[in-house]
Image: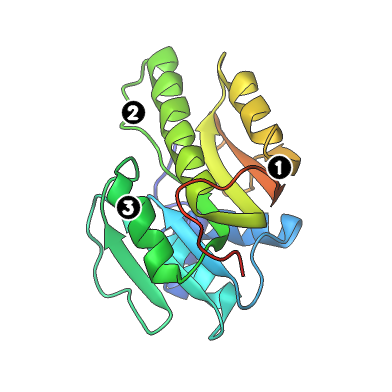
C-alpha cells in the first residue's frame, strides 16, 4: 500500500518543496543532465509546483521557468519564473509560451497524469494520450538539440509512443526514478537532442 507520508514526502516538507515529485526531477537531472544553468524550461502540468521549484534552482538567475496547468497555483512566481493557466491542447498556449520565453525552450517536461480509474487499460490509454499531447506541444516550442521529459504508464501502447519520441531525438531513455512508488506503472521517457522539425512559427532558436 502506498503511504502518502513516506520518506520522500517528509523530505519534501522539510526542504520546502511542494511535492515529493521534486526528488524525481532532481534524480533525473543528476543522471541525465537535462537542465543546466541559464536554460529556458517549460513545465507542463506543473501544479502544485514541485518541479518548477527544482527547475528554478537548476537554471539559476540566468534562466527562466514557465509552468502551465489548468489548475491555478499561487505564490510561485518571480522575476524568472511564471505560471500560465491553460490547456496544453489549445493553440493559444503554444503561442503564449513562445512569447513569454522570447524564443524556444531548452527543455520541455511533463509530469501530467490522468485521473486514475483503477482500470489498468483505461488509465494507460489516457496516460498515452496526455503524453502525446505534451509531445505535440513540445515540438512547437522546443529548440533544436533541446531536451524532453515525459511521464507515461506502461502498457500496450508504450512501445509505439516511444518510437515516436525516438524519431525526433538523438537519444531516448526510459527510466524510473527512485522516488517513484513501487506499485506504480509510471515510467519516464527522456529525449535528448531534439532534431525534429519545429512547428508553429519562425521564432529564433537562440
Residue 51 higher or lower than 16, as above or below:
above
* x and y percentages locating residue 172 in the rendered image: 73, 39
| Quadrant placement of the C terminus | bottom right
Mark 3 → mark 1, Cα distance in angstroms: 23 Å
User: Residue furthest toward the right?
Assistant: 170
| 189 to the left or right of 117 | right
Query: Does the rendering let one see residue 37?
Result: yes
Front: mark 1 or 2: 1
* x and y percentages locating residue 100 in the rendered image: 38, 69
Query: Does the rendering let one see residue 46?
Result: no
Mark closer to the chain start, 3 or 1? 3
| Quadrant placement of the N terminus | top left
Mark linked to residue 116: 2
Mark closer to the chain start, 1 or 2? 2
Q: Mark 3 points at which residue?
A: 93
Q: Which residue is rendered at x = 57% and y = 53% of the image?
A: 24
Front: mark 2 or 3: 3
Q: Which of 55 and 176 is in front in this view?
A: 55
Q: Which residue is rendered at x = 53% and y = 86% of the image?
A: 61
Q: Which residue is rendered at x = 60% and y = 64% of the image?
A: 205
Mark 1 → mark 2, Cα distance in angstroms: 30 Å
Mark 2 → mark 3, Cα distance in angstroms: 25 Å
Q: Name the residue under label 1.
A: 169
Q: Are marks 3 and 1 in contact (CB under 8 Å)?
A: no
Tell me the crowding category of disc 1: few under 14, some 14 to 19, or many 20 or more residues within 10 angstroms, Cα based. Answer: many
* x and y percentages locating residue 157 in the rendered image: 55, 17
Q: Which residue is rendered at x = 70% and y = 33% of the image?
A: 166
User: Label 3's element?
Assistant: helix
Task: Identify the image's colour scheme: rainbow, by chain, secondary structure or one colour.
Answer: rainbow
* x and y percentages locating residue 65 in the rendered image: 46, 69
User: Label 2's element?
Assistant: loop
Q: Quadrant of residue 169?
A: top right
Amino acid at each position: 500500500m502506498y503511504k502518502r507520508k513516506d520518506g520522500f514526502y517528509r523530505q519534501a516538507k522539510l526542504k520546502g518543496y511542494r511535492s515529493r515529485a521534486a526528488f524525481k526531477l532532481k534524480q533525473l537531472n543528476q543522471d541525465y543532465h537535462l537542465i543546466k544553468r541559464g536554460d529556458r524550461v517549460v513545465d507542463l502540468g506543473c501544479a502544485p509546483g514541485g518541479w518548477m521549484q527544482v527547475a528554478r534552482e537548476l537554471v539559476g538567475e540566468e534562466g527562466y521557468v514557465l509552468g502551465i496547468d489548468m489548475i491555478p497555483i499561487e505564490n510561485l512566481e518571480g522575476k524568472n519564473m511564471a505560471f500560465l493557466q491553460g490547456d496544453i491542447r489549445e493553440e493559444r498556449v503554444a503561442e503564449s509560451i513562445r512569447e513569454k520565453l522570447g524564443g524556444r525552450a531548452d527543455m520541455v517536461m511533463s509530469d501530467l497524469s490522468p485521473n486514475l480509474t483503477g482500470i489498468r487499460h483505461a488509465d494507460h490509454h489516457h496516460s498515452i494520450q496526455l503524453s502525446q499531447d505534451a509531445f505535440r506541444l513540445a515540438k512547437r516550442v522546443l529548440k533544436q538539440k533541446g531536451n524532453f521529459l515525459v511521464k507515461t504508464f506502461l502498457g500496450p501502447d508504450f512501445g509505439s509512443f516511444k518510437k515516436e519520441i525516438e524519431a525526433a531525438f538523438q537519444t531516448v531513455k526510459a527510466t524510473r526514478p527512485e522516488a517513484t512508488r513501487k506499485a506504480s506503472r509510471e515510467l519516464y521517457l527522456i529525449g535528448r537532442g531534439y532534431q525534429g522539425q519545429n512547428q508553429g512559427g519562425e521564432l529564433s532558436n537562440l
